Every structure is written in structure tokens, then in C-alpha cells.
Image (spheres, rainbow, N blue to C red):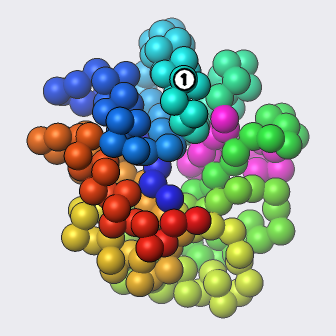
């Protein structure tokens, strides 16, 4: 599984980046709007939503659950969010995709049995730490897909797969590359042995 984390970039517009990731074969765009205003975010989504729908691409957003519901996005990725995943599930409905960032193995294990679709470990963790936390989470019976979130290079992918992650979420390594289309395709190729 590859999630392309869409964030502002100095070279391309966000719709251009989404288009290139999709052309490279990415089936999941995750919008991380940072400090964008609601007005700017709505304007951006008026371009992203039809693009993703036309290509059968999943489109999720970090935290903005009200906007996700209003505009019919596929779901949300909860990062340091005040509401519980179950409250978000009740609000968005049974079909929504809900991912939860877990800042520790203990918090990941606590999600076990809740109606969420995947757990992610936060950006900034090294591969050894990820491997340790995945092992602890699996050992405690967590069966949800686990996504490693960060600026992982292509060279990191074999070690991440060996750590038994279900997928990766990357943004800048694709967006800042010389050819985002080719780079996306290369990530997908590297992840193929662990495709779910």
C-alpha cells in the first residue's frame, strides 16, 4: 500500500502533484493541508475530488472530518485528534476509511477491536523503532494494517517490508524528485511484495 501525502510544494501545484502520483500508479492520495484556511482547502478540493473520482483514486484528508463528510471524501487520517475513532466512525458512517496515528505501540494496541481501517506510526521514527513497535503491536494481537509514515527513500523500502509494515505514506520524496511520475511507479514496484 502506498499513500501519497499531498502537501504544498514549491515546484508544482497540489493538483499537479496529485495528477503525477496518479499517473505513476498511486491509488491513494492523502491530503495533509497543514495551516490552509477552510476557503483555500475547499478551493483545492474542488480540483482534487473530480480528479480522484475520474481515476478511481482514494482521497482522504488529515483531521478535517466535517469537510470530509460534507464533500464526500473517502475518509480521514486522524492525527493528534480530540475525538475518538468511534465518534468519527459514527459521524462519517460505515463506508468511510478511518486511519489513526498511534504515537506508541501501546496506543496502537488500544485501537484493537475498534472500527478503524489502519494504524499509522508517526513521521520521524527510524526503521528500527518501527520494526520494534510493529512486532509489539502484532504480538499483542493487533491485526489492522500498519502504515509507516515519513520521508522514506526507495532504499528504505526493503527494510520497512522486513519490519512487516503493511504500507508506507510518503510525500516529499515523491514530490521533490526529478520525475514524480517515475518515482511513484518506483515506490509501487518496491512495495509490490507487500501489496495487500
**Residue 98 point in image, percent of width and height:** 69, 48
- Mark 1 packing: few (<14 Cα in 10 Å), some, or many (20+)? few
Q: Name the residue located 33 percent from the left edge and 66 percent from the top edge.
A: 190
Q: Is residue 180 magenta?
A: no
Residue closest to the far bottom = 139
The residue that label 1 is drawn on is 54
Q: Position of residue 26 (x, y in %)?
A: 43, 45
**Place of residue 165 in the rendered image (x, y in percent of width and height, measured from the top left):** 50, 73
- Residue located 44% across and 82% down the image: 163
Q: Is residue 87 visible?
A: no
Q: Report the magenta residues as a range.
A: 74-89
Up-down relation of residue 116 to residue 171 (above or below): below
From the viewer's perspective, tell me whether residue 98 is left or right of residue 190: right
Residue 16 visible? The answer is: yes
93 to the left or right of 185: right
Q: Is residue 98 left or right of residue 46?
A: right
In-front residue for pair 27/130: 27
Q: Is residue 87 magenta?
A: yes
The correct choice, above or below, for 168 with respect to 173 in the image is below
- Residue pictured at 71% horizontal, 87% vertical: 140
Q: Is residue 20 above or below residue 116?
A: above
Residue situated furthest left in the rendering: 178
Q: Above or below — where is 41 with respect to 23?
A: above
- Name the image quarter holding residue 19: top left
Q: Secondary structure at mark 1?
A: helix
Residue 49, image x, y percentages: 55, 21
Amino acid at each position: 500500500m502506498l499513500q501519497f501525502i499531498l502537501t504544498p510544494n514549491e515546484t508544482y501545484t497540489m493538483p499537479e502533484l496529485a495528477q503525477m502520483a496518479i499517473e505513476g500508479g498511486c491509488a491513494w492520495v492523502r491530503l495533509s493541508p497543514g495551516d490552509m484556511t477552510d476557503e483555500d482547502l475547499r478551493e483545492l478540493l474542488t480540483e482534487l475530488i473530480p480528479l480522484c473520482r475520474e481515476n478511481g483514486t482514494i482521497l482522504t484528508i488529515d483531521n478535517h472530518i466535517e469537510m470530509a463528510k460534507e464533500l464526500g471524501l473517502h475518509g480521514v487520517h486522524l492525527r493528534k485528534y480530540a475525538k475518538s475513532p468511534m465518534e468519527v466512525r459514527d459521524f462519517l458512517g460505515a463506508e468511510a476509511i478511518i486511519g489513526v496515528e498511534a504515537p506508541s505501540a501501546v496506543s496502537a494496541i488500544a485501537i484493537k477491536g475498534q472500527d478503524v481501517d489502519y494504524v499509522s506510526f508517526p513521521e520521524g521514527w527510524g526503521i528500527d523503532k518501527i520494526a520494534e513497535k510493529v512486532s509489539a503491536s502484532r504480538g499483542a494481537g493487533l491485526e489492522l494494517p500498519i502504515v509507516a509514515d515519513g520521508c522514506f527513500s526507495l532504499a528504505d523500502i526493503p527494510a520497512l517490508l522486513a519490519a512487516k509494515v503493511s504500507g508506507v505514506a510518503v510525500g516529499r520524496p515523491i514530490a521533490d524528485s526529478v520525475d514524480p511520475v517515475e518515482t511513484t511507479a518506483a515506490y509501487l514496484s518496491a512495495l509490490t511484495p507487500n501489496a495487500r
